[in-house]
Amino acid sequence: MEKITMEKMVNLCKQYGFIYQGSEIYDGLANTWDYGPLGSRLKNNIKDAWRKRFVQDNKNSYELDAAILMNPEVWVASGHVSSFSDPLIDCKECKSRYRADKLIEEFSEGKETGDGWDNEKLKKYIRENNIPCPKCGKTNFTSIRQFNLLFETHMGVTEDTKNKVYLRGETAQGIFVNFMNVQRSMRAKVPFGIAQIGKAFRNEITPGNFIFRTREFEQMEYEFFCKPGTDLEWFKYFEEYCMRFLKDLGIKEENLRLRKHKPEELVFYSKGTTDIEYNYPNGFGELWGIADRTDYDLTVHSNHSGKDLKYLDPETNEKYTPYVIEPSVGCDRLLLAVLCDSYEEETLEDGSTREVMHFLPSIAPYKVAVLPLMKKYHQEKAEEIYNMLSKEFMTSYDETGNIGKRYRRQDVIGTPYCVTIDEETLNNNTVTVRDRDTMEQVTIKVDELVDYIKEKVRF
Ligand code: GAP
């Protein structure tokens, strides 16, 4: 199947109400995007699926919703203030600005990522390989400077350094600083996990590729606290757990791959990191990062705050700082993967084409559409059935245009089931239910319709 281009995806998302350019009527604000009626439903459904798998399905998992603004000392302790930065390089000729590591990654077609390299090593690689500026083709670059990605703002009425705060650069820190609160209030026993979904902000040097890299985005992070020595086992477990979740979400196996970080790429506190990459329209890119963060986070917060963050094992009386395995996925990147993976331009037997979004039914924005065959005769009964279905599911109602065109519209927005109301409905209280993927229709009694759909849209 041919891959959809990013440009086509951006247009399709706008046309059908998935995603719009941010602040569009003011000519936009670079790389900001607003989720429309269908996009926000899809995103919520993806979050619900993640929440089900990472919180509900595990009795030792707890969800948290921490504040975006935190005491700035959190970011000093975590190392973000001193070293949450990317290597910035400018082309002296055309003034284009790049991330030096990404310049190398693109030039080497992914063979080198530049992850974990210092400025010296990055500069040497660029010089020795004569990497040209992708825009003007010249090889005249500035030196590399580190650019901190934290967004700063001020709390209160005066803007001085005393009341400087940061928009969180990741949701994870909200979890680490609440480790003791959750452990004590929930009487949680190690191993246990804390999950959080929320916005994160990074002043990215080169945002782009639609919603792949933006300055405001959402993360779904899971911090799993385990006994030191058991961490590598859990790390493996979560690699498989995350991969299974993606496949269960309907993402095709051939579009996913694991990339294990080489030892020289690892951040200093990490014992191991694996990325799950998805084959986006512009090639494979990081979707999900799974890291063994050791006891780094709890140790630095304990040292910096002066609070004891050690866990006392009630059975053995052992006191230790738990290790952390962290599967962290970007909600927007996952949504983009779902959109790209679900889209198909299908050639039908009669030679015409139809565009379809093959969303897994449980995450589709609308689960079902109610379509009266002829508005004049079937509208009243259709509204009755719409009222019945909409109590249970997100239901679309469309009575405008010919039935074929209405089916096509539901196909492209990914509605898995279309219920047609016709003379049979009036005479026998039955409806036809059309399956989006096979286009086959079955006759169902109205009384059995809710249960029929319910069974099909469960995750
Ligand atoms: N707590 C670990 C952490 O934040 P990360 O690899 O920097 O790790 C985790 O981010 C995930 O968040 C990434 O795998 C990606 O899916 C998503 N992400 C990171 N930066 C992003 C950005 N600028 N725009 C959209 N998603 C982003």
Image (cartoon, helix red, strand yellow):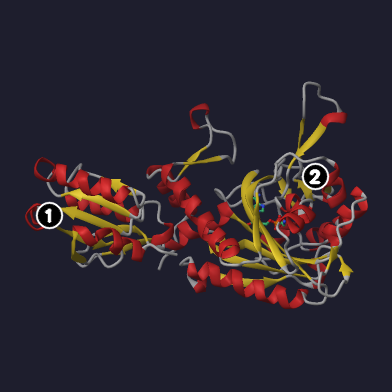
Tell me where residue 405 appears, x and y as whole percent.
22, 50
Asked whether residue 214 is in view, the answer is: no
Q: Residue at x 87, y 30 (%)?
A: 162
Tell me where residue 380 appears, x and y as whole percent.
15, 42
Tell me where residue 317 appears, x and y as whole percent.
87, 71
Q: Quadrant of ligand 1?
A: bottom right
For badge 1, the amino acid type reads Thr
Choose the circle earlier in sequence order: 1 or 2. 2
| Residue 367 relative to residue 267: left or right | left
Q: Which residue is mark 2?
A: 148
For badge 2, the amino acid type reads Asn
Q: Nearer the viewer, residue 446 or 272?
A: 446
Q: Secondary structure at mark 1?
A: helix
Q: Residues within 10 Å of mark 2 (few under 14, many from 20)?
A: some
Q: Nearer the viewer, residue 226 or 97?
A: 226
Q: Secondary structure at mark 2?
A: strand
Q: Residue at x 82, y 77 (%)?
A: 229
| Residue 362 relative to residue 271: left or right | left
| Residue 143 relative to residue 256: left or right | right
Quarter of the image where the N terminus is located: bottom left
| Residue 365 relative to residue 334: left or right | left
Mark 2 residue's CB less than 8 Å from ligand 1: no
Q: Which residue is mark 1?
A: 425
**Residue 343 higher or lower than 200, as above or below:** below
Asked whether residue 153 is in view, the answer is: yes
Q: CA distance from mark 1 to mark 2?
A: 63 Å
